[in-house]
Image (cartoon, helix red, strand yellow):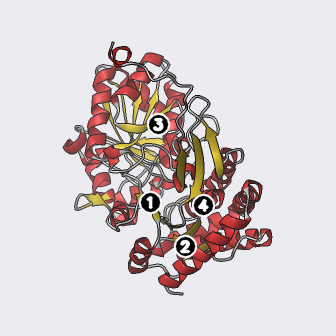
Amino acid sequence: MEIKEMVARARVAQKEYEERFNQERADQAVKIALMTINKNAEMLARIAVDETQMGVYEHKVAKNLGKSKGVWYNLRDKKSMGILNIDERTGMIEVAKPIGVLAGITPMTNPIVTPMSKIAFALKTKNAIIIAPHPKAKECSSKAVNMIKDAIAPLGVPADLIQVIEEPSIEKTQELMKAVDVIVATGGMPMVHSAYSSGKPSFGVGAGNVQVILDRNINYDEAADKVITGRAFDNGIICSGEQFFVYPKENREEVLGAFSRHGAYIVPENDREKVINAIFSDGKIDRDSVGQSAEFIAKKAGITVPAGTRILVVEAKGIAHEDMICREKMCPVMGCFGYDHFEEGLQMIKANLDMEGSGHTAAVHSNDQGNIIKTGAVMSVSRVVVNAVSATTAGGHIQNGLAVTNTLGCGTWGNNSISENFTYKHMLNITRIAPLNPRIEIPSDEEIWK
């Protein structure tokens, strides 16, 4: 089907859905859509790994289960249509309206849960959405979308409300972006830039390069296990996964010992360039290394690591542009560096973020609330994960207040329009009915300027 026809059909379906579905019926559609992914988590994870040849099956199962549950937990009690709020003081009334037809651009790194969450947000807000999957994940993404369509069809949801480009291409995606009302682009920077250049309002993401600071007087074994878990999750392809950590210089042996005990291989000095050259090519991440295991990376680098190695840790020679290991690495490899005082450590990871990943995410492991707050105050990021696995919580968690999503806004630091996790509210237009309230006394000039 041509893109033009898909969009035309979506517009008809959106009007029908808007007219026929109230909050209860829309929420039921959202629930069924998410439950469909949840109940088929294993099968969908398997076909995603088989098609994309990246990531870890068990971790993709966990993503399918956790994200579907988390998105429903966030959305289930939220009002998303009609009158949202009446201000008690002014009497201003806020009325929610759907946007219309959305384009959902989805990556090969998260080919199941990213279209899932975008569809859930669209159903919640009475919008139509057309998913444009990554060409190398077209089969598994299309399977997930069509399973959702089949599951919600008995509820009376119009067939063309949710659509997917079965044979995606760059040209088709660009055509789609120019024809819809709003674009939600999750994926590589070239695609996000293309969305911003389409002439249509767009929500994009920034580059990930999550920086971690380890404070003094913490349990390094606990922190190391969490950091390693995040870096190893889905073989490092998650944009919110830990990339680089700094630690108190005087505790180097204790810190690196803790990392070793929990499955990290500390790369010897004479092998560090081999690892860097294995994952970077001409200053960019080597595609052959993306989403591959630590053993794969080690073999590619020509080094031997113990069986069961979860990640490789390379000690940096400097910060930011001084060492390639400070850049984003979409595989289970981390960089690290020691600091003299906490504030210096913050400046180190801020420099790394200023180079790549500005606006995205930082993580802190600390028992000092002052240092935790200081991290948030200093870092140019949209979220700071505290004493937790960044890879699995920065994108939202029931316990941390961040909206569960797969699209993480990075603010103007990352050339994005929002500095929070993208969710259903960003798919709404709001009309504000604003009467003058005569009960509010207008102060005199003297009272205003005193």
Say which residue appears at 62% left-offset and 70% top-offset: 14
Give the numbered dot on residue 412: none
- For the residue labelled by badge 1, is the local secondary structure a helix, a strand or a loop? helix
Crowding at dot 1, Cα within 10 Å, few <14 / some 14-19 / many 20+, comes out as some
Name the residue carrying label 4.
122
Q: In this rendering, is residue 331 above or below 397?
A: below
Name the residue carrying label 1.
296
Quadrant of the rendered structure where residue 402 is?
A: top right
**Disc nearer the start of the sequence (3/1):** 3
Crowding at dot 3, Cα within 10 Å, few <14 / some 14-19 / many 20+, comes out as many
Residue toward you, 189 or 427 = 427
Say which residue appears at 30% left-offset and 19% top-offset: 341
Q: Nearer the viewer, mark 4 or mark 2?
A: 4
User: From mark 4 to mark 2, how far is it between C-alphas?
Assistant: 26 Å
Q: In this rendering, is residue 267 above or below 137?
A: above
Task: Classify the position of the C terminus by image quarter.
Answer: top left
**Disc nearer the start of the sequence (4/2):** 2
Tag 1: residue type?
Phe
Q: x, y (%) of residue 206?
A: 37, 51
Name the residue carrying label 3.
260
**Disc nearer the start of the sequence (1/4):** 4
Tag 2: residue type?
Glu
Crowding at dot 2, Cα within 10 Å, few <14 / some 14-19 / many 20+, comes out as some
- For the residue labelled by badge 2, is the local secondary structure a helix, a strand or a loop? helix
Tag 3: residue type?
Ser
Q: Residue furthest left?
A: 322
Residue toward you, 263 or 372 = 372
**Disc nearer the start of the sequence (2/3):** 2
Q: Nearer the viewer, mark 2 or mark 1?
A: 2
Quadrant of the rendered structure where residue 64 is?
A: bottom right
Residue 438 visible in this rendered orientation of the protein = yes
Q: Which of marks 3 and 4 is in front?
A: 4
